[in-house]
Image (spheres, grey):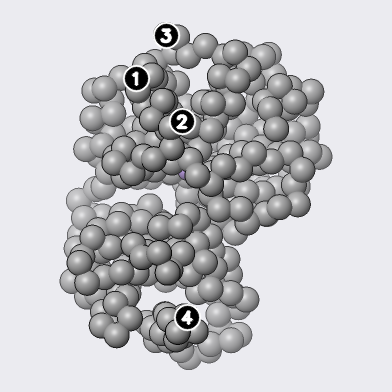
Amino acid sequence: MRLAQLEQFNPITIQCHDNPDADALASGFGLYTYFKDKGKDVRLVYAGRNIIQKSNLTLMVDKLNIPVIYLQDTDIPVKGLLITVDCQYGAGNVTRLSAENIAIIDHHQVEIDNVEMSEIHSDLGSCATLVWQMMREEGYSFEGKINLGTALYYGLFADTNQLSDIYHPLDMEMRDSLQHDKSLIYLFKNSNLSLNELEIAGMALMKHFYNDEFQFAIVKAKPCDPNILGLISDFLIQVDEIKTCVVYNELEDGIKFSVRSCVREVRADELASFLSKEIGSGGGHLEKAAGFIVREKYEAYFKNVLSEAYFNEKMKGYFLKMR
Ligand SMILES: [Mn+2]
């Protein structure tokens, strides 16, 4: 699919996944800028239970003037075209809006394969890279567009462990060629969590549970931004003995969790989908994934089972099944 193909539609709504991260915002901003320049009536939105509150993300939105809107009423049908970016329409991590036409631009493992206008490149480090490449393909010039360049660069930066997990030539090319504001990247990088979140992460890590037979860890955190769950699991997976881990918290309407794997035998996206099978949804990348378990469904199947026991049993079940 090419961006030029999508120019037949107007208006255009670009939707990031719920709890948008830097890469979703950057990719959305790229597409927004592209279609705005084409004279389209375009808006950039996200939905879900949380509004953006992590400091690196609020800084990113403010400093780069990213015109992202939190959609409160998700029952209003979308006119023209809806593009889900850094996520796949119909997947569990993005609020489903009804729309006349749907397109997908993403870099996660394919979860949804019934949307015709799709561009999914699971081998790319960031969705920002994909958007950058698609814009370039249409002859778009990034010359002098520092805010846009900084956003896309930071999207890649955030999704590739500060640029250390870059393997695809396109990711390298974007990293090396995109004009960006270095001092802003430095500021975002050093505003990744608040003191309160530091405490949540610290307490959660202290009470980790470790299974030495299968070398997995489980950590329960207090309610927090889902991006913090990712941060905690990124830290945990660096422990030599921990090969896979789940970090989660309990919310009113369900359980949000983050998964990491550093071994080939376990695909994080598959594990996330296994942990939420029948009672929620999960997906992501080979090494990093996430999911959500719906409270009502959990209660229906596992009434009176503590979340700690649930994850422990499920994880053990997963490894036993693999034997
Ligand atoms: Mn991404």
Q: Can residue 2 be seen here? A: yes
Report, in whole angstroms, how far the alpha carbon at label 1 lies from the one at label 4: 45 Å
- Amino acid under disc 3: Gly
Crowding around mark 4 (Cα neighbors within 10 Å: few <14, some 14 to 19, many 20+) is: few
Q: Nearer the viewer, residue 311 or 315?
A: 315
Which circle's residue, 3 or 4, is located before the other in the chain? 3
Crowding around mark 2 (Cα neighbors within 10 Å: few <14, some 14 to 19, many 20+) is: some
- Amino acid under disc 1: His
Q: Secondary structure at mark 4?
A: helix
Name the residue beneath numbered marker 2.
Answer: 170
Which circle's residue, 3 or 2, is located before the other in the chain? 3
Q: Are marks 3 and 1 in contact (CB under 8 Å)?
A: no
Residue 132 % position (x, y):
51, 26
Image side of residue 155 versus residue 33, left or right: left
Residue at the extreme top = 144
Crowding around mark 1 (Cα neighbors within 10 Å: few <14, some 14 to 19, many 20+) is: many
Say above or below: 157 vs 272. Answer: above
Say above or below: 143 vs 115. Answer: above
Location of residue 199 by image quarter: bottom left
Location of residue 165 by image quarter: top left
Q: Residue at x 34, y 69 (%)?
A: 244
Name the residue beneath numbered marker 3.
Answer: 144
Image side of residue 183 versus residue 22, left or right: left
Report, in whole angstroms, how far the alpha carbon at label 3 lies from the one at label 2: 21 Å
**Disc number placed over residue 180 in the picture, else none:** 1
Crowding around mark 3 (Cα neighbors within 10 Å: few <14, some 14 to 19, many 20+) is: few
Name the residue beneath numbered marker 4.
Answer: 322
